[in-house]
Image (cartoon, rainbow, N blue to C red):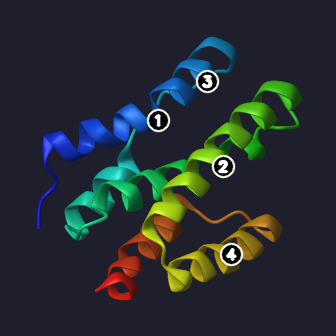
């Protein structure tokens, strides 16, 4: 399986406005790698809805990270996080897969009480391929 530049560019287009808002209003950690999650999805899944899945997974990650910044930046991190959540929802609807939606709902419950690490999230994302196959 592979990640094509065309697919990645489509995901970047989905996320572009949110990234612009983030760059204009909030600090971005130097080690933060844009589209890291989307790349992982596109490397591990090449099905019909790969771009939607990559967009959903990247948007969910960004939504959760932004909401973690709410104490330091309450207004912008919440509003921009909510914007990414709306992108997540839009991409998830395009997948039209109840099992994937349920997995994200369970993950959100866990992550709300104890934030998951980047590696835990990437492992979660890698496991979605089995649900979609």
Residue located 61% across and 73% down the image:
104
Residue located 53% across and 86% down the image:
99
Q: Is residue 87 visible?
A: yes
Quarter that holds the C terminus: bottom left
Q: Element under label 4?
A: helix
Q: Earlier in the sequence, mark 1 or mark 3?
A: 1
Q: Earlier in the sequence, mark 2 or mark 1?
A: 1
* Mark 1 closeness class: few <14, some 14–19, many ≥20 residues within 10 Å: many
Looking at the rendered structure, which numbered label has been put on residue 22? 3
**Which percent across, then down, holds residue 70?**
83, 38
State which mark lies toward you, 1 or 3: 1
Q: Earlier in the sequence, mark 1 or mark 4?
A: 1
* Label 1 close to label 4 by CB (< 8 Å): no
Q: Label 2 belongs to which residue? A: 85
**What is the distance, in whole Å, between disc 4 and disc 2 at their CAs?**
12 Å
Q: Label 4 belongs to which residue? A: 105
Q: Element under label 1?
A: helix
**Which percent across, then down, holds residue 59?**
54, 48
Q: Earlier in the sequence, mark 3 or mark 2?
A: 3
Asked whether 133 or 107 is in front, the reply is 133
Please indicate whether residue 3 sits to the left or right of residue 37 in the image: left
Residue located 70% across and 32% down the image:
80
């Amino acid at each position: 399986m592979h990640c094509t530049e065309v697919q990645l560019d489509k995901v970047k287009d989905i996320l572009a406005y949110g990234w612009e808002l983030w760059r204009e209003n909030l600090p971005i950690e130097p080690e933060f790698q844009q589209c890291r999650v989307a790349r992982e999805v596109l490397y591990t899944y090449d099905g019909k809805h790969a771009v939607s899945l990559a967009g959903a997974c990247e948007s969910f990650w960004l939504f959760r990270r932004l909401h973690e910044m709410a104490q330091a930046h309450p207004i912008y991190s919440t509003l921009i996080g909510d914007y990414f959540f709306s992108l997540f929802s839009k991409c998830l609807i395009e997948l039209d897969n109840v099992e994937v939606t349920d997995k994200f709902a369970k993950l959100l419950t866990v992550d709300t009480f104890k934030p998951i690490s980047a590696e835990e999230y990437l492992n979660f994302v890698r496991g979605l391929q089995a649900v979609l196959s």
